Amino acid sequence: MTGEGGMIRLIVVEDDTDLRETLEECLTLSGFAVDTAGSALAFFQKLATESYDIAIIDVGLPDQSGFDIAELLRKRPEIGIVMMTARGSTEDRIRGFSCGADLYFVKPVDCRELAAAAANLARRLNGGDGESRPDDERGGESWVFDRSGWVLQSGGGAEVALTSAEMRLRAGLLEHPGETVTRHGLMQAVGYADDDYGSRSLEALVRRLRRKIEAATGGGAPIKTVHARGYLFSAAIKVVG
């Protein structure tokens, strides 16, 4: 989903022209491919023909609340959601995260901090995809999935203990090694209903497993989101037990 040269694609949805242009310039200089929209309508028109890694959304848009946009976007887990608003109360933050926001910034926003957070979010959503990927994902030793011990071991030897739901997810991803497994197929494998609730539960499960792998290995997790299709395990892996 990244642009030419592997650049992270952002869209800034902000009705304040000066702030929108400032963020566009700053984020472009930080190495992102940046698009902008001044309203919710303009954003959805662009989203119909373009793909983005991250949407940075102002809450107080003239035609639709940024909270409502986040609600709609969370059905597309491949897109990271950053909310940006002058509303900084605890209730507003909770509402933002409940609507699907990955990050919540209160204006005024330091663009350098925003750029650093966006880059980190993109790495997490793509399982650490990029220059910082560990050697074992780039073609070193295989990962090991121990079904009897409920353990996933990285090529570097780091072990991740799996819950029962993570075991079913791991097994579902390995039905077709190296290939994309559809969201529907994974929801069936894990035992989730094929509806919005099941879809959100699957997204949460994938994110939790990615974080566990990242914490254990100190690098990226080779569970990749394939736009509009599903997920795949991108590293070589052996199944034992």
Image (cartoon, rainbow, N blue to C red):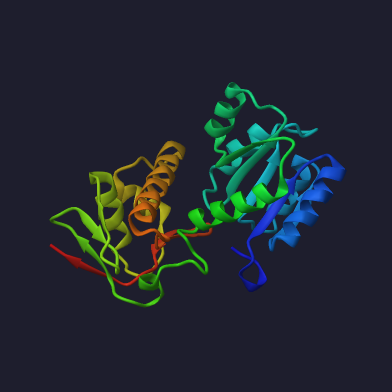
| Residue occupying image coordinates x 40% and y 50% | 211
Up the image or down, 117 lies above or below 234; here it is above
Left or right of 151, for residue 218: right
| Residue occupying image coordinates x 33% and y 55% | 216
The quadrant where residue 103 appears: top right
Left or right of 71, for residue 232: left
Q: Position of residue 45 (x, y in %)?
A: 74, 50
| Residue occupying image coordinates x 35% and y 72% | 136
Q: Which quarter of the rendered picture does the N terminus lie within? A: bottom right
Q: How many marks?
A: 0
Q: Which quarter of the rendered picture does the C terminus lie within? A: bottom left
Left or right of 213, for residue 49: right
Up the image or down, 214 lies above or below 5; here it is above
Q: Position of residue 161 (x, y in %)?
A: 24, 50
Q: Which of 74 and 208 is in front in this view?
A: 208
Up the image or down, 134 lies above or below 118; here it is below
| Residue occupying image coordinates x 60% and y 44% | 81
Q: Where is residue 43 in the image (x, y as percent from the top left)?
A: 74, 47
Q: Position of residue 202 (x, y in %)?
A: 39, 45
Q: Check the image and name the residue furthest to the right.
A: 18
